[in-house]
Image (spheres, rainbow, N blue to C red):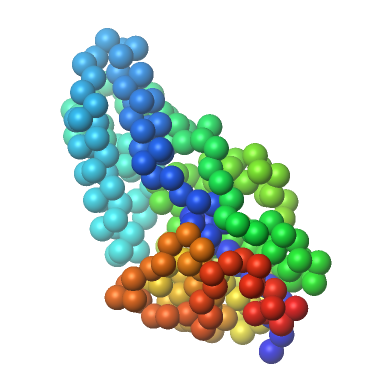
Amino acid sequence: MAIRAITFDFWDTIVRADTPATRRRRRLAIAEVLETRGLSVDHDQIDGAFDEAWNRFDASWALGEQFTGHHAAETVLEVLGHTDDDVRREVIEAYVTAPQSMDLLLTDNLVATIEQVRAAGLRVGIVCDVGLTPSVVLRHYLERHGVLGLFDHWSFSDEVGVYKPHAAIFEHALSGLGGIDPVEAAHIGDLRRTDVAGALGMGMLSLRYRGVTDDDPSHGPEADVVVDDHAQVPSILGL
């Protein structure tokens, strides 16, 4: 059956993640809040709090339980021992919004590929586990690159309420793209456990993108097709 729509994962499929830079930006933003409030700042302690927040996120993500940037910020506050309402509010705001000004890069040949796919009449969406950066910031990244309008629909985990590979987030995407039947859709992403397993479970064509990272075989099933460059996608879809 002909493919009528394709959905893209976000991190390391659309946008290259820079976890160390994001962490530094957040640490400096929180340190500034504490300094402004006249509180002691220990960067190693903040890093330790970040480690605890990430461990809690990773465990929740594996279980399919929502753990957002807001939850991470609350964890940081818990570890640092700050309970003042004003400090809590400012630290949460700093944690969540600090990455917004970062200049993250799009993956190679992404824009030309999406333009070609759209020109062939396919609908294009995003299915994304946001991690600890909220969807409002992810949309901001796309706007800064001038590509937000290339997508017809967005299914972000913090808005839908579930993570991949849960069927509900893919159903949300297919419904938003016009009620596309799963067998008429493809999904491309870098992770076996979430992207590949989720797409295969829906009956979608699964493409594993390894242009940035090559996921370990022990993490889940292999995709129908492995893609090293987005430029391969149109021909894979029969365009």
- Which of the image's four quarters has the C terminus? bottom right
Residue 58, percent across and down? Answer: 29, 56
Reply above or below: 21 against 193. Answer: above
Q: Position of residue 195 (x, y in %)?
A: 46, 70
Q: Nearer the viewer, residue 197 or 178?
A: 197
Q: Quadrant of the N terminus?
A: bottom right
Residue 37: name its quadrant.
top left
In the image, residue 229 sits, relative to residue 57, either above or below, namely: below
Residue at screen point 76% across, 66% down: 116
Residue 141 visible within the image: yes
The image quadrant that residue 21 belongs to is top left
- Left or right: where 37 falls relative to 123: left
Vertical side of 238 occupied by 103: above or below: above
| Mark count | 0
Closer to the camera, 176 or 23?
23
Measuring from the top left, give residue 161's x and y in whole percent.
45, 58
Q: Is residue 168 visible?
A: no
* Closer to us: 65 or 209: 209
Residue at image coords 41%, 38%: 22
* Quarter where residue 165 is shown: bottom left
Picture coordinates of residue 63 (x, y %)? 29, 64
Question: Residue shown at 70%/74% (left/top)?
Answer: 234
Q: In the displayed image of the protein, which residue is found farthest to the bottom?
A: 1
Which residue sits at x=64%, y=59%? 110
